[in-house]
């Protein structure tokens, strides 16, 4: 059984505008039949509350479609925001894409 994995890699500041683009990208992944969606945040330098809110909306959309959403490479600033809002308990977060691949693809 092969699952389809799609990866989104936003960069820079994840604010309302960038988050809206990310939501559209993830919606396209869902429409294309992706089973698992990874949002790699390694190039995100800063996330504000609208970026966080968008991630929650994305998570709800992915789950309601019966799919899986993961995050990876969360910066210290984003990690602190997640911890302050307890979002670190809601999202499945991996240290990096390699760790995600090992766990998801059963390599290792």
Image: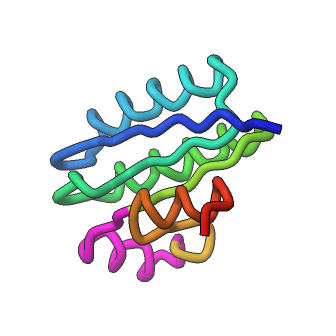
- Is 85 inside the magenta-drawn segment? yes
37 over 53 or under it: above or below = above
75 up-or-down from 49: above or below: below
Which secondary structure dominates the residues rendered in magenta?
Answer: helix
Q: Residue at x 62, y 64 (%)?
A: 103
Residue at point 56% right, 55% down?
Answer: 70
Q: Is residue 47 visible?
A: yes
**Percent coordinates x, y for residue 102 in the rendering:** 56, 63
* Spot occupied by residue 35 in the image (x, y as percentages of width and height): 70, 37
Image height of 59 relative to 48, above or below: above
Count of numbered marks: 0
Q: Residue at x 51, y 47 (%)?
A: 38
Q: Is residue 56 left or right of residue 79?
A: right
Left or right: residue 29 compared with residue 98: right
Quadrant (top left/top right/bottom left/bottom right) for the N terminus: top right
| 3 falls in the magenta region | no
Where is residue 31 drawn, in percent x and y?
65, 18
Question: Which stretch is magenta?
Answer: 73-87
Any part of residue 91 in sight: no
Between 76 and 100, which is closer to the camera in this rendering? Answer: 100
Image quarter where the C terminus lies is bottom right
Residue ID at (34%, 66%): 74
Q: Nearer the viewer, residue 76 or 61?
A: 76
Residue 88 in picture, x, y percent from top left: 52, 74
> For this rendering, which residue is in front, 104 or 26?
104
């Amino acid at each position: 059984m092969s699952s389809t994995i799609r990866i989104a890699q936003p960069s820079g500041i994840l604010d309302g505008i960038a988050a809206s683009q990310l939501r559209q990208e993830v919606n396209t992944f869902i429409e294309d039949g992706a089973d698992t969606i990874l949002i790699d945040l390694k190039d995100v330098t800063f996330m504000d509350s609208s970026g966080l809110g968008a991630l929650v909306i994305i998570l709800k959309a992915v789950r309601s479609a019966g799919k899986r959403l993961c995050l990876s490479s969360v910066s210290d600033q984003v990690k602190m925001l997640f911890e302050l809002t307890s979002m670190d308990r809601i999202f499945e977060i991996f240290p990096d894409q390699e760790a995600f691949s090992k766990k998801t693809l059963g390599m290792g």
